[in-house]
Amino acid sequence: MKIFRYAVVGGVAAAIDFAVFAVFAKGLGFNYLWVGFYGFVLATAINYILSIRHVFASGVRFGRNTEIFLVFAISAVGLSLNQLILYILIGQLGTEMLLSKIVATGMVFLWNYSARNHFIFKE
């Protein structure tokens, strides 16, 4: 059941990330890697807030500051994966931007859930 709740929370964060990407990279022509970075950071903050309210028990293993740091550290790995996937798909293979963003988001979702569930918020 927890992964379902995380999928909903992740879906909200992903929708925000995707909307930022669609508007600024696809619509306005900003560099897709910069937009990918800023959208990902915004989505990570939203994901954390929603996750501790609806999915994970906050403060189980770590204090609040450590927990936030670890979420962003794990998300930094996710961001690196996101950027690498976007670079390969868009920059090297010429794949359409929004399709590339969907693929990157799906792959990073799996990383984020696994790392958070098994390390940060493990009860």
Image (cartoon, rainbow, N blue to C red):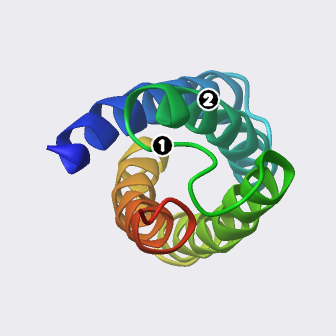
Amino acid carrying label 1: it is Ala
Q: Residue furthest right?
A: 65
Left or right of 23? Residue 121 is left
The residue sitting at 73% across, 33% down in the picture is 29
Instruction: Tell me the quarter of the picture where residue 7 sits.
Output: top left
Q: Is residue 23 left or right of residue 54?
A: right
Q: Is residue 69 left or right of residue 111?
A: right
Above or below, 121 against 44 in this view is below
- Which quarter of the rendering shows the C terminus? bottom left
Q: Residue drawn at (51%, 74%), measured in percent from left and top?
A: 119
User: Regarding mark 2 in the picture, which secondary structure is present there?
Assistant: helix
Residue under numbered circle 2: 49
**Horizontal and vertical percent for residue 89?**
47, 70
Res. 76 visible in picture: yes
The Cα–Cα distance between marks 1 and 2, rounded to whole angstroms, is: 12 Å
Q: Nearer the viewer, residue 22 or 42?
A: 42
From this viewpoint, is residue 18 visible? no
Tell me which label, 1 or 2, sits earlier in the chain: 2
Residue marked by disc 1:
57
Q: Position of residue 79 (x, y in %)?
A: 66, 63
